[in-house]
Image: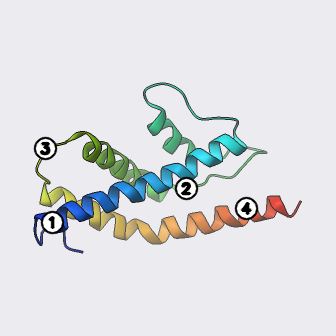
């Protein structure tokens, strides 16, 4: 999808990116509740939740996400915030294109990380 194609395509991409990050965040919330005892608190909890996913918690769980994803996922989190709160803003095609390109480059890392974490969880259920 080329966000520069037209306004409808740009809006569609913005919502798809919003939903993609929301799905990832939902997964991280479930992990935090089930394995870590709860979610971070305070106004920065979205950032803290994502930051925590890059850390191993010894004797509890491995890191969920690899360091290669720090920048692209923080960019996507910030973009989702923008989409949620910029009610009447025009979409910046350059920003949309940059987000799209970063997500394309990050996708193989994200897929591998989530597959590895799924294997970790499957190992827990085998205990």
In the rendered image, the vertical position of residue 71 relative to residue 109, given as above or below: above
* CB-based contact (under 8 Å), mark 3 and mark 1: no
Asked whether, in this view, residue 89 is left or right of residue 73, the answer is left
The residue where tag 2 is placed is 65
Q: Quick one: label 2, few (<14), some, or many (20+) residues within 10 Å?
A: many
Asked whether, in this view, residue 50 is left or right of residue 20, the answer is right
Q: For the C terminus, which image quadrant?
A: bottom right
Helix or strand or loop: what does disc 4 sit on?
Answer: helix
Which of these two is toward me, 21 or 53?
A: 21
Residue 68 percent across, percent down from the top left = 46, 59
The residue where tag 4 is placed is 120
* CB-based contact (under 8 Å), mark 2 and mark 3: no
Q: What's the CA distance linking mark 4 and mark 2?
A: 13 Å
Residue 37 percent across, percent down from the top left = 70, 35
Residue 55 seen in the current view: no
In the rendered image, the vertical position of residue 36 relative to residue 95, given as above or below: above
Q: What's the CA distance linking mark 3 and mark 4?
A: 43 Å
* CB-based contact (under 8 Å), mark 4 and mark 2: no
- Residue at 41% x, 54% y: name it: 21
Nearest to the eye among marks 2 and 3: give it: 3
- Residue at 80% x, 63% y: name it: 123
The residue where tag 3 is placed is 88
Helix or strand or loop: what does disc 1 sit on?
Answer: helix
The residue where tag 1 is placed is 8
| Sequence-first tag of 4 and 2 | 2
């Amino acid at each position: 999808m080329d966000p520069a194609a037209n306004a409808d395509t740009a809006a569609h991409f913005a919502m798809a990116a919003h939903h993609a990050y929301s799905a990832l965040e939902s997964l991280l919330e479930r992990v935090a509740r089930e394995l870590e005892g709860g979610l971070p608190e305070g106004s920065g909890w979205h950032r803290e939740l994502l930051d925590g996913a890059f850390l191993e918690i010894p004797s509890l769980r491995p890191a969920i996400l690899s360091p290669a994803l720090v920048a692209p996922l923080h960019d996507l989190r910030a973009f989702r915030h923008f989409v949620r709160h910029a009610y009447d803003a025009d979409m910046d095609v350059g920003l949309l294109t940059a987000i799209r390109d970063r997500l394309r480059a990050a996708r193989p890392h994200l897929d591998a990380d989530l597959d590895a974490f799924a294997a970790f969880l499957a190992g827990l259920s085998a205990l």
